[in-house]
Image: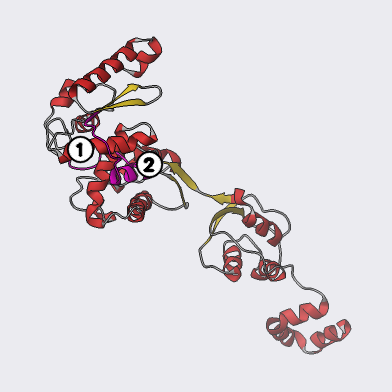
Amino acid sequence: MVLGIFSLLLGIGAAGAWYVWSNYESQVREVLGWELPNDYAGTGNGTEVLVTIYSGEIGSDVATSLFEQGVTMTFDAFYDLLLADPTLSFVPGTYRLQEEMSARSALDALLDPANKVELSATVREGLRAGEVIEALSAGTGIPLADYEAAIADPSIYGIPDVAPNIEGYLFPATYTFEPGSTAEDHIRRLVDETFIRLDAAGVAPEDRHTVLTKASLVQREARLADDFYRVSRVVQNRLDNGWRLELDSTAQYGAGETGSVWSSGDALGADNPYNTYVIEGLPIGPIAAPGDLAIDAALNPVEGPWFFFVTVNLATGETVFSETVAQHEQAVAQLRAWCRASEENAAYCE
């Protein structure tokens, strides 16, 4: 058969041989045993390639991406592996591979979670917006200036017009982001998560701002889980009775102070829409990022007669709730005594 093919090519001359080769190369190669390899050998040439598998893609889509990005030599080399094992499936995401990988090594790499590329950041409960974007920048490597620009106009994320800024709308959690996503993508993700949590808690869209404002106060003032609901009751009792809230956390926020046990005289006397020692009712907006517990406490304050509270042990978070001014003054004296009791205690009270 091989001799017959050679004789045919020689017999038809150079022009005819070129025509046969141009139009029937694969058949000629198959007959002569000259088939080209369709797969690389080894685990790559050292040049990194980021391959993204999108939700809803099937095996042929993945095989195409690998071939087009130079990871595998051919579509068939990878796709044949998938056909041989119909149980294979991929987790959407971006993976770190290399150019010129064998189909098997490319498949193994895609199935190894260690090769999945993710940007991650943890946002703690109670952080202010500026601290939130600092945490995002530290986790993702995206410049802080990009996040500052991304939060400049809160309205693009569906935040109500009554909100003076994005404060309180950046939900605290641990997030993972795909490579190539932007600071604006990340901010939108946090805001959307806030709305998801509020919806799950049964908060109507028109009540979101009020609930987040209350929840942020609870988040900044309470230390222990049960106390979240007691602090919420103090806030509600004062609102219901027309009392000023007189919360140090709001005075410090309005004055731009980072916070300590004792507020400065300037902060307490400052005339701004956050200082609840001066204004009536709630501040103009949230003062920090509340979590699920604070949101639930804002919606469901425990029953109680309290109008005052003070943390008397800053190491453990023990807090005394009081009904009268005299009781509250005794609790404040208890805190001062605790602060004087040791150098270790005093460090908490600075």
Decide if residue 89 is on the left or right side of residue 132: right
Viewer-side residue, 317 vs 19: 317
Q: Quadrant of residue 12?
A: bottom right
Distance from label 2 to label 1 (Cα)?
Answer: 44 Å
Identify the residue shown where x is 32% and y is 38%. 229
Disc 2 on helix, strand or loop? loop
Task: Tell me if residue 127 can be seen.
Answer: no
Of tags 2 and 1, the one toward the viewer is: 1
Relative to 11, say whether 254 is above or below: above
Percent from the top left, x then y, of residue 146? 34, 45
Percent from the top left, x then y, of residue 33? 82, 75
Image quarter where the C terminus lies is top left
Identify the residue shown where x is 33% and y is 10%. 340
Relative to 129, say whether 345 is above or below: above
Q: Label 1 is placed on what type of residue?
A: Asn
Q: Label 2 is placed on what type of residue?
A: Pro
Question: Which region is colored magenta?
Answer: 283-308
Q: Within the magenta stretch, is there residue 298?
A: yes
Q: Quadrant of residue 29?
A: bottom right
- N-terminal of the pair, mark 2 or mark 1, is 2
Disc 1 on helix, strand or loop? helix
Q: Quadrant of residue 25?
A: bottom right
Q: Within the magenta stretch, is there residue 72?
A: no
At label 2, counting other C-alpha atoms closer than 10 Å, the crowd grade (few under 14, some 14-19, many 20 or more) is: some
Task: Tell me if residue 71 can be seen.
Answer: yes
Decide if residue 302 is on the left or right side of residue 87: left
Residue designated by label 2: 143
Residue designated by label 1: 237
